[in-house]
Image (spheres, rainbow, N blue to C red):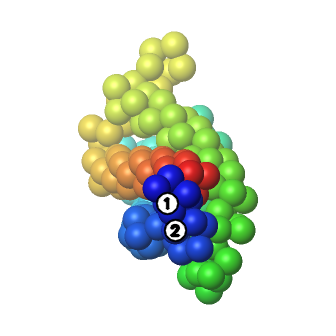
């Protein structure tokens, strides 16, 4: 009886592999959408405030410029990679098993990059929202609510994209485990 199961799984893909592959396509498409929208929302985050003589444009806060740039670059990279990997995996459905290990490793790298950029962006977002006396940063969000709302929405979208990548890595582990049996 055991040999029949091994022969069945060796000759034909397991029924759950097709559903796992379909779920992977859906999650990857979701990652494409989320990283794209997060990049756009962060890129257009801008608000100008007049404080008497001083005009403060919050598109780029000097102390947080690097964090926002890193966020935009990583989410753009994740978007481009997600789009290419989705197109490649959909075009080569028959040979998807051969590429699965490489795509899974790249998914894990994108997950690491997204967690890194989200951590940096959240840290700066907390500082601009609550202020920091040691860094001479006042509470900015009270004055530029629209800017802070854009930043927060972008971070949330990117975090959901990170969860999508975590799910992709988990699906790859399950799929590789099922194919080894």
In the displayed orientation, state which residue is furthest to the bottom. 91
Front-most of residues 70 and 57:
70
Residue highlighted by disc 2: 8
**CA separation, marks 1 and 2?**
5 Å
Q: Please say if 117 is above or below 20.
A: above
Front-most of residues 40 and 106:
106
**Secondary structure state at the residue bearing disc 2:** helix
Asked if one can make out residue 68 in the rendered structure from this viewpoint, the answer is no
For the point 45% across and 15% down, the residue is 133
For the point 49% across and 60% down, the residue is 5
Residue 36 in percent (x, y) is at 49, 68
In the displayed orientation, state which residue is furthest to the front. 1
Residue 155 in percent (x, y) is at 41, 48
For the point 62% across and 48% down, the residue is 108
> Few, some or many C-alpha atoms within 10 Å of disc 1 (few <14, some 14-19, many ≥20)?
few
Tell me the quarter of the picture where residue 7 sits.
bottom right
Q: Is residue 83 left or right of residue 25?
A: right
Q: Please say if 57 is above or below 51.
A: below
Residues at badges 1 and 2 in contact (C-beta under 8 Å)?
yes
Asked if one can make out residue 25 in the rendered structure from this viewpoint, the answer is yes
Residue highlighted by disc 1: 5
């Amino acid at each position: 009886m055991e040999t029949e199961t091994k022969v069945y799984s060796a000759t034909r893909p397991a029924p759950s592999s097709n559903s796992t592959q379909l779920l992977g396509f859906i999650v990857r498409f979701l990652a494409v959408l989320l990283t794209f929208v997060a990049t756009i929302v962060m890129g257009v985050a801008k608000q100008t405030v007049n404080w008497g003589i001083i005009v403060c444009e919050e598109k780029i806060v000097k102390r947080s410029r690097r964090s926002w740039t890193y966020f935009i670059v990583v989410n753009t990279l994740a978007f481009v990679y997600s789009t290419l990997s989705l197109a490649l995996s959909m075009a080569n459905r028959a040979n998807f098993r051969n590429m699965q290990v490489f795509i899974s490793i790249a998914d894990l790298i994108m997950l690491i990059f997204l967690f890194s950029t989200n951590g940096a962006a959240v840290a700066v977002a907390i500082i601009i929202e609550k202020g920091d006396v040691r860094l001479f940063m006042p509470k900015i969000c009270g004055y530029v609510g629209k800017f802070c709302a854009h930043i927060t929405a972008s971070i949330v979208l990117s975090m959901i994209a990170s969860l999508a990548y975590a799910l992709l890595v988990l699906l790859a582990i399950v799929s590789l485990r099922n194919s080894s049996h």
